[in-house]
Image: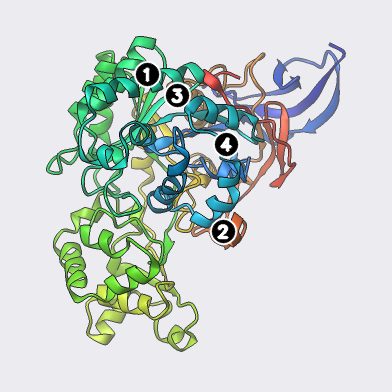
Amino acid sequence: MTSYDVHIKGGTIVDGTRVPRYKGDLWIKDGRIAKIGGRADHTSEREVDATGCIVAPGAIDLHTHYDAQVRWDPWCTISGWHGVTSVVLGNCGFGFAPCKPDFRDRSMLTMTRTEAIPYESMVQGFLPKWDWETIPEYLDSLEGAPLGVNVLQYMPTASLMTYVMGLDAAKSRPATKAEREEMQRLLHEGMDAGLCGFSIQRLGPNSTQADFDGTPMVTDTMCDDDIFALAEVLRQRDEGFIQLTQATSANPNDPEDLDFKLRLAEVALRPIIDNVVPVSQKNPRTHQERLEWLAKAQSGGLRIFGQGGTIRTGFAFSLDNWNLYDSSPAWREATTGTLEEKIRKMKDPAIREAIKRETDTANTLFTQTQIAVGGPAHRLVVQHIAGRPDLCDKYEGKSLSQIAEEEGKHYLDVMLDVSLETDLKTEFLGEGPTYNVDHMAGVYNESPYTIPGVSDGGAHTKFFTGGAWTTDLLTWMVRDTGKLSLEEAHYRMSALAAHAAGFKDRGVLREGAPADVLVYDLDELDISPAWIGEPVFDLPGGEWRRVQHAAGYHHIFVNGVETFTDGDCSNETPGKLLRHGKG
């Protein structure tokens, strides 16, 4: 070796293993960490001054929906701005492979509804690059695309079932023996090509994330035996893991079927990442009972890891593209269809009465995921009334309950009436919940089996900005409150995430490991804007999203190549498709 590529000098190293931080230098050569600590034994082509900074492994974002966005934004921002160097795609059973050519448009429409990814952005930024049908072809295409982060890919189970059974059959009945065997064969084929396992959203008939036509997603009502058939593939291979989103069971009267998760772990004998660990801001037993359940499962040899949603972010939305009231059948009906159809339904007295009845008398539909749906509807604030200056002074800045009292209306009539004045573009601001940092941090401090994240990065892009979770965790839980140690935070964000999800040789700073490295000033870390992301028109097709930028990350390296310097993108794309977690 004649020289190193990069010498990161004078920083405080937090290596991701929980080893106490220490002052030291780090050297990079050919995309890998060549040396940590000690004195320079060779020259370096570049020196990075890390004085006063933390040098840590890049974060791993296990729950994203960047499946389309990665094709026009290789760095998967927002996550890429906030220290994430590896992402997992295909979560919740959703994705774009395997997919027959004549089903491409329907696949994009599904993602438009369930994950609120703008359709026109996919048409212009994703569809022209669609050159696959099977999973092996898809992985080859992904590997050949420019990547600014490392990527791991699940088998999207909804796509698999639709490919084998057809959409109508996949939504209406269990698979036949022949169909089940074909799905197993295709999962084997995908695993041979480099998949990391499979994923499922199972939210029951009143799914909180419905399909384009308002019906549950394919996997929402998937029968146990079809899931177990896929789990048997992982057991036979002794590789891969399962991502499971299951806030409700297939039985609508059962709020959460924990026994099913145990049975699935027993069949697969592989790790399961369970989304999400529930947290109450008032009752600590809510998360503690789940942690106790995880501990019992692990002590019995079942490797189930809980993932926590730690991000503190607000919601701002308008009813023209809102999809997070779908657990209410009446709201789901009203917000499904074209803009004209939505307007017609929101004027319908019968639908309105059903919305009010379900919201007033069955508020529990929303309380379990209150943060995720913007908080109680009567506390929503009218933030912006597009194109109607005559109504701005009258309504903007007021809550729905305040306007309802002034006008003698039901607050939901206020919401619908004001929305209809602007073709459903009136913007509502969700109330900021009061977060209990002891309970949120307790998810990690009280269990060895929990991982932060659930960013949903790439999804719901007009509503919230979960991709900033890394910066929020480091500033709120570590720096500002001291509820989580810096060493513990990086272990959870990187090393434990890599272990649970099958990343090979990533998540820690170790000699010989790929150089996914952050250099940041903990005192300078910041999210801007702080609460609600600002609208930015930077998506294909002239579409917009909400963004929160990061401050304090001076250098972000992916495989030894700098991708961001003080927030500025280098336009380098050193990321890799990690087949079988390797690369």
Tell me which colouring the rendered structure shows: rainbow
**Which element carries disc 1, helix, strand or loop?**
helix
- Which residue in the protein does label 3 denote? 501
Viewer-side residue, 537 vs 102: 102
Q: Which residue is mark 2?
A: 529
Crowd around label 4: few <14 · some 14–19 · many ≥20 (10 Å): few
* Mark 2–mark 3 distance (CA, rounded to whole Å): 31 Å
- Residue 376: x and y, percent? 28, 62
Q: Give the amino acid at mark 2.
A: Pro
Which residue is outermost to the front? 102
Q: Disc 4 and disc 2: Cα gap in Å?
A: 38 Å
**Residue ID at (40%, 66%):** 320
Q: Is residue 177 left or right of residue 161?
A: left
Quarter of the image where the N terminus is located: top right
Q: How far apart are the two marked residues, 3 and 4, measured between alpha carbons? A: 27 Å
Q: Quarter of the image holding residue 166?
A: top left
Q: Which mark sits nearer the N-terminus, 1 or 2?
A: 1
